[in-house]
Image: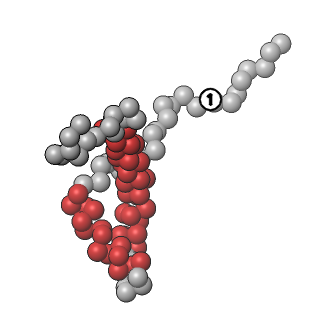
């Protein structure tokens, strides 16, 4: 005779990990002076600001990587290997 499964299985949906929203330009402008002061040890880093910087770090780095990749694509398209650019006024 098979034993009944007395273990209750987890059936609730998984709760997604909280993520911060987009980091606005205004937020970056507010962080920058404090981050510069903290990096030169002019003043200690406020814990709340430090926590915000840690939370904002991943989205900022992700955006930077995406922008660099986009610029690489633009640069590759703007200067293909089979094109020779002539200086203005230069006779061909």
Query: Considering only vertical position in the picture, is 35 above or below 42?
Result: above
Residue 31 image-quadrant placement = bottom left
Query: How far across and how far down the image is residue 25, in percent?
Result: 23, 57
Q: How is the image coloured?
A: secondary structure
Query: How far across and how far down the image is residue 91, in percent?
Result: 20, 40
Residue occupying image coordinates x 31% and y 48%: 21
Taking the view exactly as shown, the residue that stands out farthest to the left is 89
Q: Is residue 35 left or right of residue 16?
A: left
Residue occupying image coordinates x 28% and y 40%: 85
Decide if residue 66 is in sight here: no
Q: Is residue 65 left or right of residue 25?
A: right
Taking the view exactly as shown, the residue that stands out farthest to the top is 1
Residues 14 and 75: in front is 75
Taking the view exactly as shown, the residue that stands out farthest to the front is 91
Taking the view exactly as shown, the residue that stands out farthest to the right is 1
The residue identified by callout 1 is 9
Query: Considering only vertical position in the picture, is 65 above or below 83?
Result: below
Residue 77 image-quadrant placement = top left
Decide if residue 9 is in sight here: yes
Image quadrant containing the N terminus: top right
Crowding near the residue tagged with mark 1, few <14, some 14–19, many ≥20 C-alpha atoms within 10 Å: few
Residue occupying image coordinates x 45% and y 40%: 16
Query: Considering only vertical position in the picture, is 14 above or below 21?
Result: above
Q: Is residue 7 left or right of residue 37?
A: right
Image quadrant containing the C terminus: top left
Residues 32 and 72: in front is 72
Q: Is residue 58 left or right of residue 32?
A: right
Residues 23 and 62: in front is 62
Residue occupying image coordinates x 40% and y 69%: 50
């Amino acid at each position: 005779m098979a034993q009944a499964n007395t273990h209750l299985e987890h059936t609730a949906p998984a709760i997604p990990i909280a993520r911060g929203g987009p980091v606005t330009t205004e937020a970056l402008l507010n962080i920058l002076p404090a981050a510069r002061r903290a990096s030169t040890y002019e003043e200690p880093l406020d814990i709340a600001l430090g926590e915000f910087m840690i939370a904002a770090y991943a989205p900022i780095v992700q955006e930077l990587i995406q922008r660099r990749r986009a610029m690489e694509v633009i640069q590759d398209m703007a200067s293909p290997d089979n094109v020779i650019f002539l200086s203005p006024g230069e006779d061909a």
